[in-house]
Image (cartoon, rainbow, N blue to C red):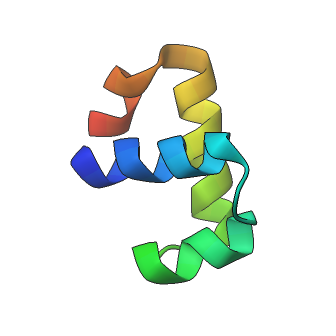
Amino acid sequence: MEEGIRFVGLAQAERFTLTDLCEPFGIRRKTAYNHLERYALEGFNALSA
């Protein structure tokens, strides 16, 4: 969950492109969009699932 929170925080800050964030987190862009959508719908608790 901690990595998910960090990823969403960085993505929300809009200092990096989503593509730039995906590599260090080891996820694909599709997965990144899924994380951001889950966060938008349910908040940080959704990232622990």
Check the image and name the residue furthest to the top: 42
Q: Is residue 41 left or right of residue 5?
A: right
Q: Quadrant of residue 47?
A: top left
Q: Is residue 26 left or right of residue 21?
A: left
The answer to whether 27 is drawn above or below residue 13 in the figure is: below
Can residue 49 be seen here? The reply is no
Q: Position of residue 36 (x, y in %)?
A: 61, 40
The answer to whether 42 is drawn above or below residue 7 in the figure is: above
Q: Quadrant of residue 38?
A: top right
Q: Position of residue 5 (x, y in %)?
A: 37, 41
For image coordinates 60% across by 18% down, the residue present is 41
> Image quadrant for the C terminus?
top left
For image coordinates 49% across by 16% down, the residue present is 42
The answer to whether 43 is drawn above or below residue 10 in the figure is: above
Can residue 19 be seen here? The reply is yes
Q: Is residue 27 left or right of residue 44?
A: right
Q: How many marks?
A: 0
Q: Position of residue 48 (x, y in %)?
A: 27, 36
Q: Nearer the viewer, residue 29 or 20?
A: 20
For image coordinates 62% across by 50% down, the residue present is 11
For image coordinates 54% across by 51% down, the residue present is 10
Q: Nearer the viewer, residue 27 or 10?
A: 10
Q: Nearer the viewer, residue 39 or 7?
A: 7
Q: Nearer the viewer, residue 5 or 16?
A: 16
> Image quadrant for the N terminus?
top left
